[in-house]
Image (cartoon, rainbow, N blue to C red):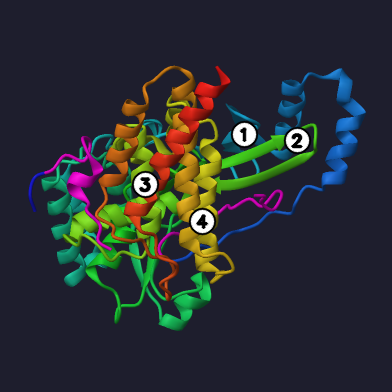
Amino acid sequence: MRKININNNFSDVLKYGKFKLVPFVLAASMLSGCGVRMKSVEPVKSSCISNSLNDIGDFLEEQNRLATYFSNWGYNCQDIGDNFYRVKEDYNQNIFYCDSLDEFRNYVDIKNPTYDDVRCAVIENPSFKGEYETWLLEGLDNLEKASLNLDLVALYQNIKRMSIVSQTIDEIVSEIGSPGAYFSIEDGKVFLNPETVTPYTLCHEVLGHGISDIQIEKDGRLIFYKPDFLLLYADIDNADYYFKYTGFSLEEGKADFISDIATGIKSGGPYDVEAEQLRIFIETIDISLSDYIKYGTSYLVKTMRENDIDRPIDYIMAVDELLTGQREKNFNIPNNFLMEHNIVEFFKDYADDKINAGVSNTVIKDKVQGVLENTSYDFVTAGEFFIYDSVDMDKLQKRVLSEVDNLQEISKKSR
């Protein structure tokens, strides 16, 4: 594979060919691969919250009230704006959520492992004998050649503890709803069918998810990092609350990107749509794949806001909902229509504040056009078993640029 630098341009490396949420669902276990399992906690009753709010309403300021409720629920949360809060600690399950791999590295002895360290861990792990070892070592060689500047601290810890668990296709389908494989972050187990597993599948789970999804026990508590983060939405006035892992769809896209490079396969992963959404997000705001892996979805949200994107969590959650519908075989609304709409709204959000700030139409359109041209998608397909309403990327580009022109005209008329 040619030497590349993904920090400069996603597309130089990867050229592809081809809300309301339930209140108080705590996704305590997000298993990757082709499916997801969730553990739920008993919902907090909205009526109880509403009554409690009425009781203390005028006596406490909003932040004090939120702190009181977070504490009562057993969570330490950080305000990230617009009624959204990042969960830092879950006292109920004794989990500490790291903000980044930098924070996670404080809890391990080998803080900056090299590719050679990871290779040794693969060779020494009895679960990776035979073709599994060969596939992973080749994958690591390709990742190193790609010069991605990837942080390997989580991958090293995962490789040391990982074990392969063989399952039948029926067993896998019963767990995740579809044939495939999945990685359990809690115990480092990779569940797969040895008769159907491919290098791509193994690298997706072990390297693609293992490079960032990590949970270890340290000093009597669980230390946890995933680029997708546990998010609390808290609307005090309307007594509206929910917990949700946010960005799990982008994580699947990221794992496909890693597997593409590790295997030398430039297309054909199961999460093409999610990968394309991630690419558009990070290229628009000029962050690298390595920084996304290292600092996660909350960093993506922060950087989107710094780039005049007002509703970043909405766009990320829309991709999550798209993937959820895909997994549940819910094709009432075509998946690619949802993707196309999400991209259009994202770029309109990106452009409107810049137009109002006086940035020229040419500069904005050049940026948008560059991002959209960095794909070799002739169309995008979604669904594990169906090709569903393909998106013509040339037409999508024209539509987005037309929307930018419309925003410019509206801005001129309002002056």
**Which residue is pictured at 49% across the width and 48% down the height?**
342
Residue 399: % across, % down: 41, 47
Which amino acid does the dot numbered 4 rest on? Leu
Label 2 CA crowd tier, 10 Å (few <14, some 14–19, many 20+): few
Using the image as rendered, state which of residue 91 and residue 63 is in the foreground: 63
In this rendering, the answer to whether 82 lies above or below 28 is: above
Which residue lies under the disc numbered 3? Answer: 398
**Could you give the CA–CA distance between mark 1 and mark 2, rounded to whole angstroms?**
18 Å
- SS for callout 2: helix
Labels 2 and 3 touching (C-beta < 8 A): no
Which residue lies under the disc numbered 2? Answer: 72
- The magenta stretch is 4-33
Labels 1 and 2 touching (C-beta < 8 A): no
**Which residue is pictured at 49% across the width and 20% down the height?**
356
Which residue lies under the disc numbered 1? Answer: 84
Which residue lies under the disc numbered 4? Answer: 338
Which of disc 3 and disc 2 is earlier in sequence?
Answer: 2
Which amino acid does the dot numbered 1 rest on? Phe
**Could you give the CA–CA distance between mark 3 and mark 4, rounded to whole angstroms?**
17 Å
**Could you give the CA–CA distance between mark 4 and mark 2, rounded to whole angstroms?**
38 Å
